[in-house]
Image (cartoon, rainbow, N blue to C red):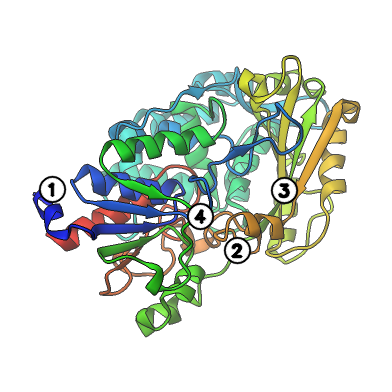
Amino acid sequence: MLRNRKAQFLSNYDAVVVGSGPNGLGAAIALASSGAAVLVLEAKETPGGGLRTDELTLPGFRHDVCSAIHPMAAAGSFFPHHGIEVEWLLPEIQATHPLDDGSAGVLHHSVQDTAQANSSPRWNKLFGPIVQHWSEVDETILGPGWRVPQHPFTLARLGTRALPPATVLARLFENPQSRALFAGVAAHANGSLSWPLSSSAGVGLIAAGHVGGWPCAEGGSQSIADAMVARLEALGGIVQCGSEVRTRSDLPRARSYLFDLTTWQVDRIAGDALPARVRRSWRRFRKGNGSFKIDYALSGPIPWTNPESRHAGTVHLGGTWEEVALAEATVRRGRPAERPYVLVAQQSLFDPTRAPAGQHTLWAYCHVPNGCTTDMTGPIEAQLDRFAPGWRDLILHKTTTTPSDLESYNANYVGGSIDGGASELHRVLFRPDFSVDPYRIGETDMWLCSSSTPPGGGVHGICGFQAAKSVLRSWE
């Protein structure tokens, strides 16, 4: 039916998507799958948004510029259901959280193996039922928070785990290793772990890890964008790079416009075309914390004191769960942490395309206040010293990326925030406001399809998919 409509538009499009991140491409693929004529406009010379890979240090060392490890993409239904083919590579151990005594919380692909490795029967009790009903969880949580759930019992089961503060849920585990492991995963949300709903990121990411693992994409995150573009083009969609949209006048004629941009960018582009109510509501949407990142080219693998960490794709550094909570609370109060929580990825351990033979890449970042100008190289490297003494002897080259650099690289990363807006309290579920349809911008011909909408940040494409569903409903 939509294919018949397409002929009526000739030089126009059914939909124009601004931004080619995973959500913009996800929206375009969902629309094109329904027969719509879709154009994606990308300001940069290559598509991908946070899905780009480059030689940031030395020739032959391929670093993920932003996103690196993809549990939600691997476990979610969007990619396989839309024919997007990505070669996921799983590490031997999905993630670890080392402690000062040389032990670590260890995340395995299997729930049972994780419970056994951490001497934590409660781990299996908490996450086993969620993993068992993952298809229902996937359908229930990856969308707008206001909708009536199709699986209320699954939602209730999930809610008892996701609603409490992460600091409360962490205490339920039996030992320091499992508590630290949970807190380190929950801290991905980049907010205070003492607030209600701060457990949600930990619960979701851990469960996803037990379903699809915590993989990287072979060849780098850019290969995910390449696979999405290939699928879109196979459906007849077009991606046009080097096409920055500054005002609405830069847009070709279309029936609907979708923005894989933050609310602040859309406000600048659309201006008075936005309903006044929407603009007022968006002003209450807080910018998220920023990130400070370092990429390393190394002559060998990191010599972690903890042996399991030498086989892990992801390593969380921060010490005990109390230390992680303190670091994240400090950032939320507007100060960089002296001993930051650091996220580390070791893609070259299980993807040989990332570095020359025998050598390795290291990807590391910490959270900082939005727009922070403090150089966090010292604090990040001190955490690496703490858990891998002697690692500095391996450094061949390093490149730092400040919050300002992140925003220059991708205008979506306002102040270095990579999550489209703060994911805290009610904003975990209701973002950027309390609209019945958080994707459609009032009654206009514009939609928001970025991580500023539910379910928020991460590489999953669901924000775009849900926005596309809203567009299709409006066309009925």
Which disc is residue 247 wearing?
none
Mark 4 lies on residue: 197
Mark 1 lies on residue: 3
Mark 2 lies on residue: 414
Tell which of 172 and 339 is nearer to you: 339
Q: Secondary structure at mark 2?
A: helix
Q: Residue at x 41, y 63 (%)?
A: 430
Label 3 is placed on what type of residue? Cys
Mark 3 lies on residue: 366
Mark before the other along the chain sequence, 2 or 1? 1
Tell which of 430 and 193 is nearer to you: 430
Decide: is 453 above or below 458: below
Q: Residue at x 39, y 39 (%)?
A: 229
Mark before the other along the chain sequence, 1 or 3? 1
Q: Check contact, mark 2 vs mark 1: CB within 8 A.
A: no
Horizontal side of residue 380 vs 154, given as left or right: right
Q: Secondary structure at mark 4?
A: loop
Decide: is 118 above or below 375: above
Tell which of 179 and 83 is nearer to you: 83
Task: Identify the image quadrant of the C terminus.
Answer: bottom left
Residue 184 rendering spot, x and y as whole percentages:
65, 41
Q: Residue furthest top?
A: 357
